Amino acid sequence: MKDIYVEGASFPFALAHRSISEYSVHGELPHWHNGIELICVSQGHVRCQTNQHTFLLHKGDLCFINQKQLHRLIQSDAGDSRYIALFIGAGLLIKHPAVYDKYILPMLEEPSFSHILLPGQNSNAGKIRAALREMELYWRERPCGYELELIALCHQVFRQLYLAFIEKENAASPADGNILLLKKMIEYLAERYAENLSLADVAQAGHVSKSKCSRLFKQYTGLSPIAYLISYRLEESAAMLRNSLEPVARIAQACGFSQQSYYNRLFFREYKCTPMEYRKAKQADGKSGARP
């Protein structure tokens, strides 16, 4: 799956405020990263699904999601829920062999460890929220040497996560075999979403029957394989609309839609606006939020 670190591979870090309402009517699509993710709910309630586990996060709660774990966030009530998302690549953490092997690898490579829940009143959670506030300041203002401060704060966060990890009380069990099959099929869709794919193609990627393919997608994503594919195509097209000036017709073709009129209808159903309206709104937001 694609990584989302905005600074690129040289500095794999990102910090963002997000709203569940930013996603489509289906909510966030299940996905995974090659780095770790930390979620801190700042408003409302968020339902988080990690592999086969689903749990409710309240304001102030945190959830650490290990690398390469299938997950998604879902709106849990009628109000708009917001959260802070922190993304860290393992390459940003301590590389001294003795320290890295003692504290970092046991967490990242433990097969039975998919996530840790930290209730808002937990002392570890309070320290992590304080570090997130400092991170946000440095991330927004980018003073000279801000990367060094961010790296130091990342290690402060990891120490609190490690203390929670060794307690093992909230560490979840490993993904079951069905999750691993589903990840194979999702990865296949992510690599070939622009092609003319069928249910049989997706099922073959996971070496399962069409009926089992449909059952796994419905169980863990809430969507059929083809509905997931369409939503993924629309997400990719939305990213192209935000980040390029390519004509809408060309974007539709590049994302697997042979007819622009069909693409426009699906996009409006998903995002409640036309592709051009979406582009104007998002690019205007980007200009207004740009740093001097």
Image (spheres, rainbow, N blue to C red):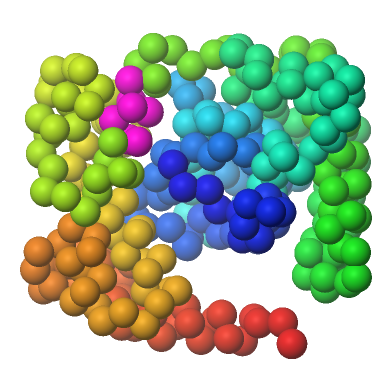
Q: Would you say the magenta stretch is mainly helix, strand or loop?
A: helix
Say above or below: 127 vs 292.
above
Residue 224: x percent and y percent? Answer: 21, 37
Which residue occupies 36% across, 82% down?
245
Residue 214: x percent and y percent? Answer: 19, 27
Which residue occupies 51% across, 43% down?
73
Say whether residue 255 is left or right of residue 97. left
Quadrant of the frame with the N terminus? top left
Q: Is residue 19 magenta?
A: no
Nearer the observer, 99 or 213: 99
Which span of residues is magenta-colored?
A: 181-187
Q: Quadrant of residue 158?
A: top right
Residue 24: x percent and y percent? Answer: 37, 58
Say above or below: 15 vs 199.
below
Say whether residue 92 is left or right of residue 206. right
Which residue occupies 41% across, 85% down?
280
